[in-house]
Amino acid sequence: MYTFEYTLDEEDFASFNKYHLMNSPSFKIKTTRTGLVYVAISIMLFLFALFLFLDGQPAFISFILWWLCGGMFFGGMIVIFDMKYTSDSATSSYIKKTKKEGRLPFNNEPVRVQFGDNNMHLVTELHESEISYRIIERVVEDVNAIYLYYITKGAFILPHRAFESGQQKAEFLTFINGKVSQTA
């Protein structure tokens, strides 16, 4: 049996969301499409500016359009090739929005989780529940935490700071992976 006591904070929530975005195929597709749209618009602006310049229009109009298309082109390239920047930006926006709306999925209260032979026992100041290992779809270890996914976009977050040592974390990973594979 393993018992952990910890408090989740905004950084834990941000780390999970960044991990999830960076490993989400739909995020990668959406980001690539957005970047390609920026690049396509910048190419059209460039051609339009070139047409205006060759047509004898004032050079400053073409110059302004070239600046716009250059910015959009490089912005599109950043969106396409720097997914980390894009995921950090998306995560920050999401957290600000959910915080403003009062919908953060944690409230900085202590969490106590016991992992027994058949289930997890989760206790907070406001909630207590027994959770079967059968609902855990996969176990993922990231640099900041272990995520026990129970749905595609949701997971129990177990931060590394909850473990007393690296050995305890390794033993727990062996334990939880065994429980999840038994129920799959």
Image (cartoon, helix red, strand yellow):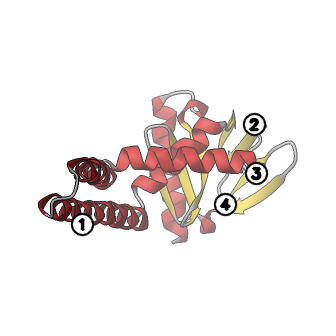
Residue 115 in sight from this viewpoint: no
Circles 4, 2 touching at the beta carbon (< 8 Å): no
- Residue drawn 78% across the image and 37% down it: 109
Classify mark 1: helix, strand or loop: helix
Q: CA distance from mark 1 to mark 4?
A: 61 Å
How packed is label 4: few (under 14 Cα within 10 Å), some, or many (20 or more)?
A: few
For badge 3, the amino acid type reads Glu
Circles 1, 4 touching at the beta carbon (< 8 Å): no
Classify mark 4: helix, strand or loop: loop
- Residue position for label 1: 44
Q: Earlier in the sequence, mark 2 or mark 3?
A: 3
- Residue drawn 53% across the image and 62% down it: 180
Closer to viewer: mark 2 or mark 1: 1
Q: Nearer the viewer, residue 2 or 126?
A: 126
Q: Nearer the viewer, residue 131 or 108?
A: 108
- Residue position for label 4: 118
Q: Nearer the viewer, residue 173 or 67?
A: 67
Looking at the rendering, which quadrant does residue 13 occupy? top right
For badge 1, the amino acid type reads Met
Q: Earlier in the sequence, mark 3 or mark 4?
A: 3
In the displayed structure, does residue 76 sit left or right of residue 159? Answer: left
Circles 2, 1 touching at the beta carbon (< 8 Å): no
Classify mark 3: helix, strand or loop: loop
Circles 3, 4 touching at the beta carbon (< 8 Å): no
- Residue position for label 3: 101
- Point out residue 161 in the picture as x, y percentages from the top left corner: 57, 30
- Residue drawn 53% across the image and 48% down it: 91
Classify mark 2: helix, strand or loop: loop
Q: CA distance from mark 3 to mark 4?
A: 37 Å
- Residue position for label 2: 108
Q: CA distance from mark 1 to mark 3?
A: 39 Å
How packed is label 3: few (under 14 Cα within 10 Å), some, or many (20 or more)?
A: few
